[in-house]
Image: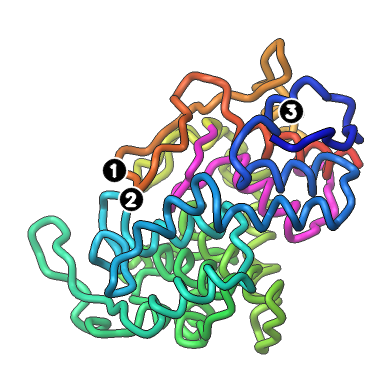
Amino acid sequence: MVENPPKSATGHQPVLDWLLDSDPAIRWQVLRDLTDAPDAVVAAERAKVATEGWGAQLLAQQGADGSWAGVAFNQELNSTMHVLSLLREFGLDPASAAARRAVGLVRDHVRWRGWDWDGRWQGIEFMGNPFFAGEVEPCINGQVGASGAYFGQDIERILDYLLAEQLPDGGWNCEAENGSTRSSFNTTICVLEALLAYELAGGNRSGVTEARLGGEEYLLARQLFKRRSTGEVIRQDREGSTDFTRFAFPTWWHYDVLRGLDYLRQAKVTPDARLADAIALVKSKRDENGRFPLEAFYPGTMAIDLNEREGEPSRWNTLRALRVLRWYFG
């Protein structure tokens, strides 16, 4: 718990006290995004991610071979890719000794290998690739690329794939190799997060910003959760994804409105009228105590328990919702 936390600029002190009574991964982001805390206070709290709580637990589980769960990727949500995604969400400082050591082991030792999907071996063309070289599906490459860029790794090969795979409507779709010509919200958000992470880390490769802006327009043109053709709310997309109006954390490869809004906030997009319904949806989720629920939890065996349960108030969703509202309303 942060002693004598700075007062909120948002006027929701009871909610902020509840958020601050949590893990360092949440506390430092609350201080940065929802209060007027000095930079030194934020930095001191962020440093604890490597040594306390969830972040320290994840780092302690890394194998001698540099991996988590012994693989680059699995369906169980406890693989190297999934853990690095969580560490990025937690805000583990890339410059910290703990991050440099852990990510260096991944870079130097973890390799992709074919994995069984519906009884068939896939991925022959990327077997043996170093982890940060990625594989072939843009949704996975987006997740790997976001973590790689955040932690200062070379993701040029992943960028090669992503820039070449953008569809004419501005987004991306893992099913494009099977003939799909329309983008997927799920794949698009994964790719956008990678492109933005690359730029925020100082990358300036030609074409990245243009591709990112095209992907953002794909979301905005659909008001973040509606079909462009009819304007109807998307209850289920072509991939059978959960309703985009139900908010999850962690999201993994799944899109939802809160994830889309939090991305746009981080990208410093200027809010416009196309976001009004998405923001109204977020506001409608707030309970009488000013908290936001966890509405979806994707099945799998995570490396750690974040102590949040579907249907109950969620610190992660509350943090993300409040900072989105603060960004939108100024």
Can you tell which mark lies on residue 27?
none
Which residues fall within the magenta stretch? 247-275
Q: Is residue 35 left or right of residue 156?
A: right
Can you tell which mark lies on residue 77?
2
**Residue placed at 14% from the left, 62% from the top?**
116
Give the structural element (helix, strand or loop) at label 1. loop
**Residue placed at 40% from the left, 38% from the top?**
305
Q: Is residue 201 left or right of residue 308?
A: right
In terms of sequence position, does the residue under pointer 2 or pointer 3 come before the other? Answer: 2
Amino acid on which disc 3 is placed: Ala
Residue assigned mark 1: 301
**Residue 9 pos. (x, y %):** 91, 35
Dot 3: few (<14), some (14–19), or many (≥20) neighbours within 10 Å?
A: few
Can you tell which mark lies on residue 280?
3
Task: Judge whether residue 225 can be spotted in this image.
Answer: no
Q: Are marks 2 and 1 in contact (CB under 8 Å)?
A: yes
